[in-house]
Amino acid sequence: MCVDALLNDIEFHRREMVHLAATTSLSSEEVIRTSVKLDQLLNEYNMIQSKNK
């Protein structure tokens, strides 16, 4: 995945998680699922950044 697309995906999931947390609860299944996906995307981004140093 290209870095720009990855950053867009990270931002989308971040906004989605904030929205879900505001409309449900922090412990809702949707918030947790989105948080896990966001963590995966951030880890992928960090791996790419580490390889580029």
Image: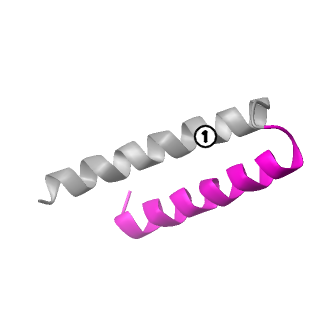
Of residue 27 and residue 5, the one placed in the foreground of this image is: 27
Q: Image quarter for residue 49? A: bottom left
Label 1 crowd bin: few (<14), some (14–19), many (20+), radius 10 Å: some
What percent of the width, then of the height, locates residue 43? 37, 43
User: What quarter of the picture does the N terminus occupy?
Assistant: bottom left
Disc 1 target residue: 35
Q: What residue is at 79 percent from the left and 48 percent from the top? A: 20
Q: What residue is at 36 percent from the left and 64 percent from the top? A: 3
Q: Is residue 16 magenta?
A: yes
Q: Is residue 18 magenta?
A: yes
What percent of the width, then of the height, locates residue 28? 79, 32
Q: What residue is at 31 percent from the left and 50 percent from the top? A: 46
Answer with left or right where residue 35 lies relative to residue 24. Answer: left
- From this view, report whether residue 14 is shown above or below residue 7: above
What percent of the width, then of the height, locates residue 51? 16, 52
Of residue 46 and residue 27, the one placed in the foreground of this image is: 27
Farthest-out residue, right: 23
What span is in magenta? 1-25
Q: What residue is at 44 percent from the left and 60 percent from the top? A: 6
What percent of the width, then of the height, locates residue 22? 82, 51
Q: Which amino acid, mark 1?
A: Ser
Q: Secondary structure at mark 1?
A: helix
- From this view, report whether residue 28 is shown above or below residue 50: above
Answer with left or right where residue 2 lies relative to residue 18. Answer: left
Of residue 2 and residue 31, the one placed in the foreground of this image is: 31
Q: Image quarter for residue 31? A: top right
